[in-house]
Image: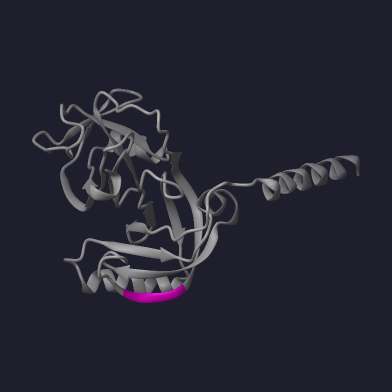
C-alpha cells in the first residue's frame, strides 16, 4: 500500500509541475511543413523572432479517415511538393511539451501563399518529438553545413539545421539504400549530417551526394534527393 501511495504522489507531483510551467511566448498560429505518408512528419516553419523562434520536427497522428484523405490527395497531385498544416492558435512550447493535441487545417501548398485547403478543423496529435530547439541569439554558425536526418525504412528526409541569422530553411526527401546507414537511422530519432561546404548561406550543392555523421563521422550515401521546400526571407 505504501508503494502505491508513493507512485501516486510522484505522478501527481509531476502532473502539478507540468501544469505550473509558464511560458512567456504569446499564442500564435504555428504553420508546419508536412512530409511523409505512412508516417507524417511535421517541420515547424520558423523565424528568428518570438514566438516563432523554434526549430521543431515532430510526428503527427491523424484519424484513419483524415490520414486516408491526406494520402489520397498526395497521390492525386504527385507534382505538388508542399503540404502544410495551419493549426489553431496556441503557445508553441506548451503544445509541444504538454498539450500535444490541437485542431488544424491541411493545405496542398503553403497555407499563407495561395495553398488550397482540403482538410478543415481536424484533430491532430503530436505523437513524438524528434527535434526541439529554441534559437539562441548568441549562436554562431557551425564550420560545416548541417542537416537533420530522420525518417523510417521507407521514407527518409533531411532538414537543414538552422543556427544563426541570416540562415535558410530547407526540407528534402532523400533515399538511403545502405543497410548500415538505415540501421543507424533506426537506432536514433535523428542524425546530424555534415556536408563540407564553404558557403553556409547556400544549400548543399549535391555535387557529391555523401554526408558524414557528426557523431560517428561515418559516411551516409544518398541515392536520390528532391527539394520539397526552401525558404530564405523568413530567416533573414
Report the residue at 29% width, 52% height from top. Answer: 155
Instruction: Tell me where residue 231 appears, x and y as whole percent.
Output: 24, 50
For residue 29, say whether it is visible.
yes
Report the residue at 78% width, 41% height from top. Answer: 10
Instruction: Tell me where residue 124 appears, x and y as whole percent.
Output: 49, 65
Q: Is residue 91 left or right of residue 105?
A: right
The answer to whether residue 111 is above or below residue 165 is below
Task: Determine the image quadrant of residue 109.
Answer: bottom left
The secondary structure that most of the magenta stretch takes on is strand
For residue 172, say whether it is visible.
no
Q: Quadrant of the C terminus?
A: top left
Q: Is residue 16 left or right of residue 135?
A: right
Q: Nearer the viewer, residue 113 or 173?
A: 113
102 magenta-colored: no
Q: Quadrant of the N terminus?
A: top right
The answer to whether residue 113 is above or below residue 15 is below
The answer to whether residue 73 is above or below residue 170 is below
Task: Determine the image quadrant of residue 181.
Answer: top left
Q: Nearer the viewer, residue 18 or 4?
A: 18
* Range of magenta residues: 117-121
Q: Residue furthest right?
A: 1
**How has the structure been colored for display?**
one colour
Q: Nearer the viewer, residue 154 or 194?
A: 194
Task: Determine the image quadrant of residue 177.
Answer: top left
119 magenta-colored: yes
Report the label total.
0
Instruction: Tell me where residue 86 appears, x and y as whole percent.
Output: 40, 65
Q: Residue furthest left?
A: 207
Q: Nearer the viewer, residue 159 or 166?
A: 166
Instruction: Tell me where residue 46 appears, x and y as whole percent.
Output: 36, 49
Amino acid at each position: 500500500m505504501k508503494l502505491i501511495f508513493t507512485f501516486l504522489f510522484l505522478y501527481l507531483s509531476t502532473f502539478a509541475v507540468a501544469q505550473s510551467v509558464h511560458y512567456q511566448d504569446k499564442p500564435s498560429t504555428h504553420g508546419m511543413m508536412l512530409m511523409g505518408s505512412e508516417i507524417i512528419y511535421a517541420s515547424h516553419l520558423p523565424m528568428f523572432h518570438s514566438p516563432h523562434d523554434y526549430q521543431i520536427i515532430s510526428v503527427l497522428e491523424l484519424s484513419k479517415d483524415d490520414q486516408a484523405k491526406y494520402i489520397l490527395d498526395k497521390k492525386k497531385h504527385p507534382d505538388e511538393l508542399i503540404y502544410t498544416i495551419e493549426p489553431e492558435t496556441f503557445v508553441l512550447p506548451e503544445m509541444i511539451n504538454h498539450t500535444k493535441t490541437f485542431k488544424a487545417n491541411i493545405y496542398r501548398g503553403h497555407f499563407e501563399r495561395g495553398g488550397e485547403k482540403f482538410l478543415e478543423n481536424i484533430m491532430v496529435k503530436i505523437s513524438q518529438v524528434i527535434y526541439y530547439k529554441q534559437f539562441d541569439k548568441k549562436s554562431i554558425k557551425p564550420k560545416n553545413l548541417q542537416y537533420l536526418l530522420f525518417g523510417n525504412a521507407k521514407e527518409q528526409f533531411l532538414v537543414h539545421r538552422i543556427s544563426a541569422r541570416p540562415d535558410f530553411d530547407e526540407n528534402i526527401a532523400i533515399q538511403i539504400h545502405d543497410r548500415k546507414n538505415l540501421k543507424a537511422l533506426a537506432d536514433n530519432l535523428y542524425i546530424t549530417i555534415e556536408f563540407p561546404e564553404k558557403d553556409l548561406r547556400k544549400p548543399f550543392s549535391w555535387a557529391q551526394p555523401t554526408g558524414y555523421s557528426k557523431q560517428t563521422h561515418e559516411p551516409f550515401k544518398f541515392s536520390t534527393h528532391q527539394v520539397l521546400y526552401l525558404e530564405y526571407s523568413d530567416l533573414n
